[in-house]
Amino acid sequence: MKKDIHPNNYRLVVFKDMSNEYMFVGKSCTATKDTVKWEDGNEYPLVKLDISNTSHPFYTGKMMLIDTAGRVDKFKKRFAKHTGKRTLRPRPSKPIPLELKSPRIRGLFR
């Protein structure tokens, strides 16, 4: 292993799964602004997780809809911008002659 490439500031932090409020203590060097009071009475830095082993479908066997950042709403909002601008071309009233449809055939009649 290479020396001096790993951080030295590991400390105890509380990880909180935001989808089901499950919390556990572990070591991390992640920078965080939030703190929380743990069961032992000490205050620890808080790292918020979108998903953990208590909410992931692979470990729980249940499918859950997790939309923490409003991803579906953001997509619909972006998609709505494009649906209003798109208009269909009007179809030609008379059929297109065969010699104009294919470039290969067009070259034969010149």
Image: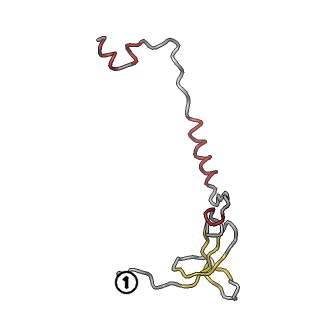
- Element type where label 1 sits in the image: loop
Position of the C terminus by quadrant: top left
Q: Does residue 7 appear left or right of residue 21 in this picture? A: left
Q: Residue at x 52, y 24 (%)?
A: 89
Q: Residue at x 52, y 77 (%)?
A: 30
Residue situated furthest bottom in the rendering: 41
Q: Does residue 100 appear left or right of residue 25 in this picture? A: left
- Label 1 crowd bin: few (<14), some (14–19), many (20+), radius 10 Å: few
Residue situated furthest front in the rendering: 61
- Give the color scheme: rainbow, by chain, secondary structure or one colour: secondary structure
Where on the picture, by quarter, is residue 105? top left
Q: Give x and y (percent) for residue 101.
A: 40, 18
The residue carrying mark 1 is: 4
Residue 31 versus residue 41: which sits nearer the camera? 41
108 above or below 9?
A: above
Q: Give x and y (percent) for residue 32.
A: 57, 76
Q: Give x and y (percent) for residue 109.
A: 31, 11
Identified by mark 1, the residue type is: Asp
58 above or below 79?
A: below
Where on the picture, by quarter, is residue 20? bottom right
Total number of numbered labels? 1
Position of the N terminus by quadrant: bottom left
Q: Residue at x 53, y 77 (%)?
A: 31
